[in-house]
């Protein structure tokens, strides 16, 4: 009996040790979860993690509160200057393999292959990803539209250039979103889930509109990095109500309206390129 009792005591001791480890791990896991939640940001005005507090959440996000070149801004025609010297957008896009990711605060398409590039002032910016905000972040003469698509580019020295395309609800659907609809439905409310979607053609999103606004600003989500070259296409495109609601329903609760409030222009120059009426490309 003695050996049996000895083995029983050892087993009980092992069980107690395991239980103590589990109890210690639960608060640690909770603490880690709370820390992660504290580092997150939201788009809800007045929330402790809302846009007015982004710059306080992490020191790396300080620019969100203290930056002087923040985005988005209102593109008011009384502050915009015509600049034909900007020229037509110089880009060379091509279909590339891509993945779609639910980042919680938005839905992003990441290009895994070479999707082409945008050239600005002799610098090439490679297209890396695209994502959506609803409603639009930028406004035109104070008007906010229903959806804004950002095509994000990065240069060899990590500088960023973004092309923004505005949408309003209409009778027609958006061709790119139509391709992605089944994947967005599968990603709905599944934060950090990722799926391969095959070939995505950036030109489906870009279109061929010529008139655009240009200014230097920042990322519109933390860390709000400044020095971003913004190009906002003037022509507003059409998205269906179903597609808009699909994007809104897919993201994490509280991010259905994931547009950052307008930021102060602070005397920055905003230009608009409009081809000459005699230009055969116009």
Image (cartoon, rainbow, N blue to C red):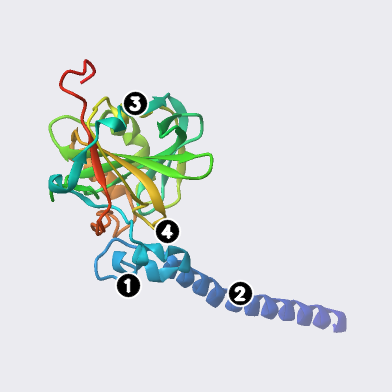
- Give the quarter of the image for residue 275: top left
Which residue is label 4 attached to?
223
Q: Which is nearer the N-term, disc 1 or disc 4? A: 1
Is there CB contact under 8 Å for labels 3 and 4? no
* Disc 4 from disc 2: Cα separation: 36 Å
At mark 2, the secondary structure is helix
- Give the quarter of the image for residue 180: top left
- Give the quarter of the image for residue 77: top left
Label number found at residue 165: none
Is there CB contact under 8 Å for labels 3 and 1? no
* Disc 3 from disc 4: Cα separation: 28 Å
At mark 1, the secondary structure is loop
* Disc 3 from disc 1: Cα separation: 39 Å
Which residue is label 2 attached to?
22
Q: Which is nearer the N-term, disc 2 or disc 1? A: 2
Which residue is label 3 attached to?
203
Residue 143 in view in this figure: no
Which residue is label 1 attached to?
48
């Amino acid at each position: 009996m003695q050996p049996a009792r000895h083995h029983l005591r050892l087993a009980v001791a092992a069980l107690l040790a395991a239980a103590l480890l589990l109890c210690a791990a639960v608060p640690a896991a909770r603490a880690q979860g709370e820390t992660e939640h504290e580092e997150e940001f939201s788009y809800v005005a007045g929330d402790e993690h809302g846009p007015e507090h982004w710059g306080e959440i992490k020191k790396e996000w300080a620019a969100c509160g203290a930056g002087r070149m923040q985005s988005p801004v209102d593109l008011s025609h009384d502050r915009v200057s015509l600049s034909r010297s900007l020229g037509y957008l110089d880009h060379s896009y091509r279909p590339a393999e891509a993945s779609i990711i639910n980042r919680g605060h938005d839905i992003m398409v990441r290009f895994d292959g070479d999707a082409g590039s945008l050239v600005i002032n002799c610098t090439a910016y490679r297209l890396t990803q695209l994502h959506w905000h609803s409603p639009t972040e930028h406004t035109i003469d104070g008007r906010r539209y229903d959806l804004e698509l950002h095509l994000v580019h990065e240069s060899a020295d990590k500088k960023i250039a973004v092309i923004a395309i505005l949408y309003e609800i209409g009778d027609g659907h958006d061709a790119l979103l139509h391709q992605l609809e089944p994947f967005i439905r599968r990603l709905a409310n599944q934060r950090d889930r990722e799926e391969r979607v095959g070939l995505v053609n950036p030109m489906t999103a870009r279109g061929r509109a010529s008139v655009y606004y240009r200014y230097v600003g920042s990322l519109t989500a933390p860390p709000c990095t400044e020095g971003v070259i913004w190009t906002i296409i003037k022509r507003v495109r059409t998205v269906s109500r179903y597609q808009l609601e699909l994007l809104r329903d897919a993201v994490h609760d509280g991010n259905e309206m994931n547009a950052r409030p307008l930021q102060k222009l602070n005397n920055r120059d905003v230009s608009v390129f409009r081809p000459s009426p005699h230009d055969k490309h116009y």
